[in-house]
Structure formats: C-alpha cells, structure tokens
Image (tube, rainbow, N blue to C red):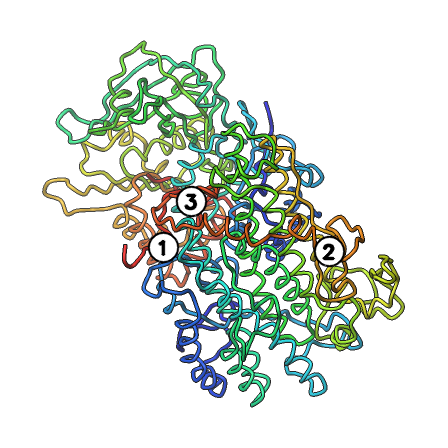
Amino acid sequence: MTTATKQHLIDPELCIRCYTCEEICPIDAITHNDDNVAVDASICDNCMDCILPCPTGSIDEWRVVETPYSLDEQFEWMELPEQEDFTNVSNGSEGTIEAIDESITALLNEAHQGAGGKSNAPASASKPAINLYSPNHPVEATVQGNFRLTEQGADADIRHIILNLGANKFPLLEGQTVGITPPGIAKNGKPHMPRLYSVSSPRDGERPNTNNLSLTVKREEQGICSNYICDLEKGAKVQLCGPFGSTFLMPDDPQAKLIMICTGTGSAPFRGFTMRHQRVMPEINGVMHLFFGARTADSLPYFGPLKKVPQHFLTKHFALSREPDTPKQYVQDRLWAAQDSIAPMLAEPTTYIYLCGLKAMEDGVEEALTKIAAATGQNWLEIRDTMRETGRYHVETY
Amino acid sequence: MAGIMDVSYDTQIPNNIGLSSDRRVLKALEKWHPGYIDWWKGSGPDGFLEDLVYLRTAVSVDPKGWAKFDYVKMPDYRWGILLAPQVEGRIIPCGQHLGEPAWQEVPGEYRSLMRRLIVIQGDTEPASVEQQRFLGKTAPSLYDMRNLFQVNVEEGRHLWAMVYLLQKYFGADGREEANELLKRQSGSEEKPRMLGAFNEETPDWLSFFMFTYFTDRDGKMQLEALAQSGFDPLSRTCRFMLTEEAHHMFVGETGVGRTIQRTCEAMNAAGITDPYDIDKIRALGVIDLPTIRKKMNLHYTLSLDLFGREVSTNAANAFNAGIKGRYQEVKIDDDHQLQDATYAVSEFTGGQILVKDVPALTAINMRLRDDYSRDAAGGVKRWNAIIKKHGIDFALELPHEGFHRKIGVFEGAPITPDGLVITSDEWAARRDEWLPSKADGDFIQSLMVAVHGPGEYAGWIAPPRVGIDNKPGDYEYVKLYMA
C-alpha cells in the first residue's frame, strides 16, 4: 500500500514570479530562485491564504504524492508533472486526501462544504485506505441482496443493497464512500461518471467477517444510476471504485459522544457507526444520539430495525414532516426539544457531531445549534470551528 | 485586526485608514475627487464609460478579502485608499537611521526629497492610463479588454494612493502637487508627464504587453524600493500597491507569451520552419518572432533608462536618509548602510566598455536596475520555452545594457544588442535590424482589430490557458453597452 500526501504546488507555466504569495504566506512556506516559485511541502499547512491574491491562478495546484517534490525539483520545472495514477493509497500523517481523481475529490469537497472549512478526521479514527480502485480500474462486486426498506405504498423507494466482494480486498471504514459506474454512455458521448454512495455497513461486513458491504439507495425519478442500482437483481455484477473519503469517520474512543443528524438515505453512515459500536463496545450506553428526519415513518429507512435498538444504547429522535394527524416535525425541532441534553455536550471535548443527508437541512440544523448554544451562553460558530479543526464536526450533504 | 484590514465604505472614498474621522484629509480628498473623475472621463479609456466590466476590487487587504470580482462601470469603480496592515515595531531598515523606529510622520529635513519621490511615482500612474487610452477600441478579445481596464483602474487607484500621502502629510504643497498630477498630460507639449517614457502613446497591443512586462516592472522595482522606506505610511501604501502591480506583470508576461504561442502555432500549421521567413509568416496574420524581438529590445531599453544614472548622489541620499531602500532590503545580508561596500558599474570611455567598482552607496540605481534585469529575464526564459516547445529554432535574449540607451554612461553609444561597440554610422544603418521600424509598426497596427464575441480571439494571439477568477473560456468579461 502507498502512503501518500497532498502537496501544494505552483504551475510554472502560469506563474509570473511576482512573489505575492511569498509575501502573503504567514509561515514562510513559499520561496523562489531566479526561475520558479515553490512551496516547501515540509512547511505548508494548506491555510490557503495565498490562493486569492495570486494574479495568475497558477497557485491552486495540487498533486497527491508518495514522496513530496523537493524545492530543488520544483525549481527545475518548466511545467507541472502529471498526477501519478495511484491505486491503493493510505493517507500520510496529514490525512486529508479524500480521493485522487479530481472529479471525485470535487464531489466530496462539495458534500463537505457545509462544515464551513477544511474538515479533519477524528484523531482516534482508524487510518482509512483510499482509492484502492480508481474509476478507471474498478473492481467487480456481486449483488448479494436487494431489499426494499420502505413500505410498498410509501412515496419513497429506498433500497438496502448488499454487494459481495468475493476474493477482492476492499478495506473500508464506517463513513467512507464508494463509487458505482452505471453502464452505458452519457449524453456527452463518454462513459458515465461514477456516482458516490455512503457505505451503510460496518468495516467487517454486514455480518462480522463477511467480505461484503451495504449501500442505502433511493430511487430518483430520472436518476440513471439510482434506477440501475435499485433494479439490480441478486447475482448481478457491479463496477465498484473506492473507497473514498478520509475525514467523515468515527472516533475509536469509548469516551466519545456522538450526535448524528440525518435525513433519508443520509442515515447510511450512521447505521455503520451504530453497528460498529454494537460490535466492539456493546456495554457502553448513553453516548449516541440519532436525529433522523423523514416524511413519514413508512418512508424512513431502517425504521423497523432501528426501533429494536434499545433507547439507552442509541437515543433516537425521529422527526416526521408529513405524518398524518401529527404536527410537522423537522430534525431542528427535535434538536431544540432535546436542548437539555445537547447543550452540555457542546461544551465537552469528547463530543462529535455528524450531519448527513439533504443540503436543505443544513440551515435549520445550524439555526437550532446556534439557539441551543446561545441559551447556555455559548457561541455556536466558535464551537463549530474548534470542533471541525479537531476532527469533531462533519458534514456530508448533497 | 479585522478593523484594520476591512475596507470602510462610510465615506465616498473606500479606505482602511479611518478616513471618516480625519476630517481635514477627507475634505481635501473629496475636493480632489471631482477633478479625478473628470480626468478619468477625459483622459481615461476612450469610450467604454457605460460598459460593464468584470473587475477586481479589494474589500479588505487581508488575503481572504483581497480579490472580489464583479461587474462595474469604470467611472463607478470604488477607487479607494488601501494600506497594508501596520507592522508592529517596524524599524528603519537602512541608512543612517538604521534600527530607529519607522517614522509615522515625515521628518522635516527629508520633506522635499520625499515629496519629490512621491510625485515622480504618482506621475507615472495616470500617465500610463493616458498612454493606453485608445487600446480598448482594438482589444483582441473581451478577456484582454477586461485586463486592460483592470490595469487602468488600478493605475488610477495608485494615483489615489500617492495623492493621499501628499494630502495627508505634505500640507499646502502636497495639495498643490496633487492638483498638478491631474493637469500634466502624457504627450502634452505644454505640460508633459515627468518621465520621457511616459509621454509616448501605446500604439498597439503588443506594445501594451511589452509595456506592462518591461515598464511596469520598473514601477514594481521602484515600489519595492519605496516599500522599504523608513516613512511607514509610504511603505504600507507601496506594499499594497505591489499586490495589484503583480496583475500588470501577469498581463504583460502572458500577453507576449500568447502572441508568441500563436505565431509558433501558425508557423507549424503552415509548415514554416525558418523564423526569418518574415513575409510568409506575416501573411498568416501573426507577428513574426524577429519583430517580437525588436519590440522587446525597444521596451527593455526604454525601461532601463527609467532607472536613471548608474551613479547617482540623489539615490545615495535617499538610501542614506532611509527614504528608499534596495530591492528586498530586509532580506539582504549586509550592514544596510554601505559604509565600505563597493558595487560594479559599467563605464564607456574611449570607445570601450569597462567595469569599475564604485562606492555601493552611489550605485543604488545600478543595483536596482540589475535586480530588474534579473527579474525581467525570468519571463524571457518562459517565452523561449514556448518557442522551443513548438520546435522552432529561435531564442530571445535581453540586449546588452549599453544598447540603445538615452540615459547614463551609455547615452548615445553605438553598441549592438550583443554588446559590440561599432561606429555610429554602422549603428544607424543597422538600427532597423534591432529595433522596430515604421514598417514593422504599421504591420502590427494592421493586425489590431477588435474582437467582441465572448471566447473569441483575434488571429494573432492565442487564448489564455485559464480565465480570470477561474471563469470559463467563453465568459463575457465586458458587457458592451452598444452590443
């Protein structure tokens, strides 16, 4: 396995050696010779202060590397080297590479945007492997099962898909993502791009030590990939790439308290988190909260199995917005209602917050947390930034 | 911190200097403002007053707020007064006051010297806008038009920066000088701009690119030297101007580079391998490499003249007084007073080029010019890389310092670009080999046609590799009023 880091570089063909970046860098990570300006990988902490003031756009260049390019190498360049095609990568000490391919990195960056800054993995999280299979070199998985999670009459068709990896190694951590490429050709005449799905099973499989993984997929009306997946029959073969993602991970710490907030299929990673918890520390109670929003109980994936998890092990807060004869409830309402237990947790350095689901829930959740914090004299934005920087605040929305 | 960084819009003049609580200066600037707008309308880009241009405006001087892009009509551009943040405990970095706290007011003894430096710097800013005022009409693309206007509005802002210093620190004299800056005109018979090179019209876009590459680079070096000043407000002003000046260098370097690229591409497509097959190459509607070299020779040498005489007591006095430092003064490892140091300076005596060591203190201009030449050589290397990449056997090289000089020890000396001394007659006879002739100028002029379609480019220049503000290739950088 390759241990890789993401290195900040400057495109020598576009750079005009104005040294604006060098002047602006707060930690003197940028230097130059007569020919080129270069970033010292051993100093740069990716603060991004240099990106906007650059007049050329040459400075926003990144390469995933096994060994960072030295200053001397960079000084010799007339053009940037190509990105090496890595498969089977594990993160170096920085732990911030989520994927190698630009398009997948962009998708993950967009999903993580709501965190308000660069996300970090929990310090105690296991080290993830990423990009074991790139989109160009996927692995074939076999459909082991395809189960409808929502009632037949419900307005959403959400599926629990189990994929068997056979003899192929596919090391995964809860919270990571995989890509599935639907067959056929896209409108632009090229093969389809892979779509990303959060894995809903724990690292050792649906049952301990089975080499499989599960996904939670909702059928979208015009969705090319979701219809393809939801129609898959047992025994069908699927092209799978990944794993991707190196920050939305669970802490490996019995003291950690988890607040998990989701809507619909955003519950996938939390199913994985909960199952992992059940398997390795079943005796630890009262540290996991799940806020789960859906339209109705029958469109809420895993409603049945979830109800069987004891409340003292996982404190469940369901928010149903279209349940007949009950007032509309959104996750933010449930958060606010639980303020007495949430507020003290915000101040604790062992608390982790995760959001997963539709982007539309971000504002409401932010609002609720702001209100809860303010009610006890705390500032949510400050808490959030600290939590994020210490790997304790995670957003993955779409 | 945020308070100092953020630009305040509570007066008509955006600023980060607390202008609203400095009634005297605010009043003086408000009085100066209408004259400035009149100057812009009369001497700024000809036409284009109503067009929406995608321009960069600073909303704060810290990295995150530095570049905010939006459409704006140029006369409505928020020209502001922006100083880089004050550095706590900054000291005077050179000269006899070395190590003393930087001045927040002008010391009386240096008042006139400092005023003169600021006025000379200030005079070049509106001058270049005047020189370039007709270029908008022949812009090879909306992208280039936008870049020209960005350069123009920022030169305008640099005038504001100098005028602020004059109004704030130099009393009635300063006010008078600020008004004069709007009265002088590039190329005027009665009231020309102060430096020769700033009185020539910029006739075409290749000249514009060469000007922004070579002549604005002189501006950059002067700003770098003034950014070292012991007079802290001047230092802070220049430091922020430098971040803007970088865009001008960018326009020049990539503009020349894209011109070269297009020529090479056209030569390759037509199967022309000899770069001196000028007629055939010109017939392709591109500028041949030898002519590009002549333009480079011209603009480089005109820019060398802007550094003044190699040995200068004025420059020595400014350094010694701590008013103007050397390029990257604080990074130089020496005594910063130049008490015993010497510096090698060329001489031209008896038809021979000699090199002589002189007291470094008197050779401040020469040193800055050498730093400039090194800096300028970097882009030439990139341009050559483009030529090489296209497999064409041709290379550009900056000419010898003695070639085509009008100021300093080589004034009028008959020296070739290679540094050979020849007779004046031979030099005159061969002039057009090295410098653009009228016919060369006419040919370049013949290619200057406006291209106004988003994402379209005139045939003599290649599109840029990346857009401004990461915009896509067909972005409408200027929304033309009449279009």
The foreground one among A174 and A303 is A174
Distance CA(mark 2)–CA(mark 3): 33 Å
Q: Identify residue for label 3.
A: B458
Tell us which disc is closer to us: 1 or 3: 3
Q: Residues within 10 Å of mark 2 (few under 14, many from 20)?
A: many
Measured as percent of width and height from the top left, residue B432 is found at 64, 51
**Left or right of A55, for residue B475:** left
Chain of the residue on which disc 3 is drawn = B
Quarter of the view holding residue A2: top right
Q: Residue at x 31, y 43 (%)?
A: A359
Q: Give the residue type at disc 2.
A: Phe
Q: Identify residue for label 1.
A: B478
Tags 2 and 3 both on a single chain: yes
Q: Identify residue for label 2.
A: B403
Q: Is residue B33 visible?
A: yes
Q: Secondary structure at mark 2?
A: loop
